[in-house]
């Protein structure tokens, strides 16, 4: 089971004089249980791509396949696909409308016909996944929370539905650095414990290096790279060509190499990089 | 995107023609005068001066006729309805009869007259809105209202409210689409089921929309005050424009067409 795109084109205003290819020949593969990053500069087609994954947009040419189901405009197919793929859009707290946090999170579950007990259970589970105390928060209004808490409730309102694939469009935008890391760590634990596939759209390369094992790089509506995140960030020319920046850890590693240092660091994540750097320094210090 | 594209009447068609570049106030006054002219006329032939001027305007504007046809679409039903009513229910000399249906010479004449009236009114307003950006248009309305400020009408504020409203129509449409996408992704079915269910399904869209609109309004108020906006203090325009020769042409042409219609009605 996986998400596959085969030669997908998406054209805005097809046939009109101002037709515009937002996606051009996109083929990609997302494995079950993966933590995949989708990166690319502004206007590279990330958001358009994301909206194909649960049938908000339909490809002009080519197929989007979710677990052997070809996404199409048929009601039965759409219901199935949306039941499997959840999307947390940018600034998801803008969608709040309910009087209490419980009602807000229960909205999706009720739409999918959960029983009263199932709704209760899913809401509590989702709250504990995003690290908010259900007893304290559920009766409050979602509008009286802090920004970080609102974001978590919004994410909980999607993961409560128990979908197999969760797509997040810039879930950490506008959060303080502590909340950023916490939100991503919660997603990682969701992936490990519930085997949910997490697809993260992000502009923050440090986040991507830290959490995503695989990365899909878009450039002007085409796939510029698809594979291991480490392999992508090691190709500094490609990173530059696609208009992206190296994560801090890779920049430090390059800087060390350029000044001929004998220190070598494990580059993948900032945390691990600091550990290996510390190790190197202590070894050299000992010599 | 689909939502913002479906608005046709009152849409701007950007261009650089003389019609586009002439003053919005001049075009607004001319449009009002031509509409008065359309109502003054009592016979179809009396529309000729207006049709001539409009044809010149459309020709000079270089706006494709297709665009005007699209503007007529929303009132197509109204046109068909009135024409049918006029054709079949006007008493007079019968020229064709079948059972209880009868068509009279007067009915045909009147139908043609009403048809021309509706089409002309629409085309005149489409030419105005197509060749003038919404912001220019609200400026023109505020100029038109300016004399009223002497009797206590807050014309500058009314104009500001209108231009802010115009400015935010596309923004709010975009916002609506964004919220619909998010709620649909949470399994919401919008506009399905019985009337009550359907009404209820709009709540998850309307409330977030209200919340974000109030927040936007607050932000805008702060941003305007931060840049020195004060209610009631005199304002100048960034794009000040001066009277041009084509403005004079429009005004003279309009005066000629309007007086042509009036004279035709009075003396012929």
Image: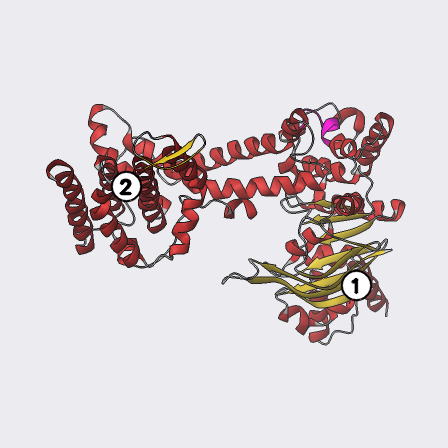
Residue ID for mark 1: A277
Secondary element under disc 2, as helix, strand or loop, is helix
Q: Residue at image x 15%, y 46%?
A: B256
User: The residue marked by circle 1 belongs to what chain?
Assistant: A
Q: Quadrant of residue A120?
A: top right
Q: Residue B121's x, y, as percent?
A: 32, 41
Q: Residue at image x 83%, y 33%?
A: A122
Q: Quadrant of residue B100?
A: top left
Secondary element under disc 1, as helix, strand or loop, is helix
Q: Which residues are magenta?
A: A97-104
Residue A186 falls inside the magenta stretch: no
Residue ID for mark 2: B140
Q: Residue B133's x, y, as percent?
A: 36, 48
User: The residue marked by circle 2 belongs to what chain?
Assistant: B
Q: Is residue B40 above or below residue B1?
A: above
Q: Nearer the viewer, mark 1 or mark 2?
A: 2
């Amino acid at each position: 089971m996986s998400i596959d795109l085969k030669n997908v084109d998406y054209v805005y205003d097809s046939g009109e004089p101002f037709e515009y290819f937002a996606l051009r020949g996109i083929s990609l593969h997302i494995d079950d249980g993966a933590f995949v990053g989708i990166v690319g500069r502004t206007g590279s087609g990330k958001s358009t791509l994301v909206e194909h994954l649960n049938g908000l947009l339909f490809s002009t040419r080519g197929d989007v396949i979710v677990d052997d189901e070809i996404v199409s405009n048929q009601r039965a197919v759409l219901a199935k696909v949306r039941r499997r793929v959840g999307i947390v859009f940018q600034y998801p707290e803008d969608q709040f409308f309910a009087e209490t946090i419980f009602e807000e999170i229960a909205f999706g579950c009720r739409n999918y016909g959960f029983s009263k007990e199932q709704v209760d259970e899913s809401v509590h589970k989702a709250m504990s996944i995003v690290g908010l105390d259900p007893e304290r928060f559920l009766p409050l209004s979602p509008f009286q929370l802090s920004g970080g808490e609102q974001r978590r409730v919004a994410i909980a309102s999607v993961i409560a539905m128990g979908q197999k694939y969760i797509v997040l469009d810039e879930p950490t935008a506008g959060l303080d650095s502590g909340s950023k890391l916490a939100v991503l760590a919660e997603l990682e634990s969701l992936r490990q414990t519930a085997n949910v596939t997490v697809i993260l759209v992000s502009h923050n390369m440090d986040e991507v290096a830290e959490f995503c094992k695989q990365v899909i790089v878009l450039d002007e509506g085409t796939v510029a790279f698809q594979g291991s995140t480490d392999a992508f960030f090691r190709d500094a020319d490609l990173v530059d060509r696609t208009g992206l920046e190296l994560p801090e850890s890779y920049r430090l590693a390059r800087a060390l190499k350029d000044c001929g240092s004998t220190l070598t660091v494990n580059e993948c994540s900032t945390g691990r990089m600091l550990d290996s750097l510390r190790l190197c320094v202590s070894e050299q210090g000992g010599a | 995107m689909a939502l913002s594209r479906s608005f046709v009447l009152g849409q701007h068609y950007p261009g650089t023609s003389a019609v586009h570049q002439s003053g919005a106030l001049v075009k607004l006054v001319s449009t009002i005068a031509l509409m008065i002219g359309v109502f003054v006329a009592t016979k179809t032939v009396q529309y000729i001066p207006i049709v001539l001027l409009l044809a010149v305007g459309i020709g000079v504007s270089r706006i494709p006729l297709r665009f005007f046809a699209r503007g007529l679409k929303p009132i197509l039903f109204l046109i068909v309805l009135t024409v049918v009513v006029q054709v079949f229910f006007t008493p007079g000399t019968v020229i064709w009869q079948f059972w209880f249906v009868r068509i009279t010479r007067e009915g045909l004449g009147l139908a043609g007259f009403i048809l021309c009236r509706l089409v002309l009114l629409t085309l005149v307003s489409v030419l105005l809105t197509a060749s003038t950006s919404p912001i220019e248009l609200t400026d023109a309305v505020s100029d038109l209202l300016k004399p009223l400020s002497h009797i206590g009408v807050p014309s500058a504020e009314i104009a500001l409210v209108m231009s802010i409203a115009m400015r935010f129509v596309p923004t709010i449409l975009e916002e609506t689409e964004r919220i619909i996408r998010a709620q649909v992704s949470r399994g919401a079915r919008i506009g399905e089921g019985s009337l009550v269910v359907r009404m209820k399904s709009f709540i998850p869209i309307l409330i977030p929309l209200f919340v974000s609109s109030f927040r936007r309004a607050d932000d805008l108020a702060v941003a305007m005050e931060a840049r020195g906006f004060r209610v009631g203090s005199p304002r100048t325009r960034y794009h000040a424009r001066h009277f041009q020769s084509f403005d004079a042409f429009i005004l003279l042409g309009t005066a000629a067409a309007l007086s042509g219609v009036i004279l035709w009605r009075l003396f012929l």
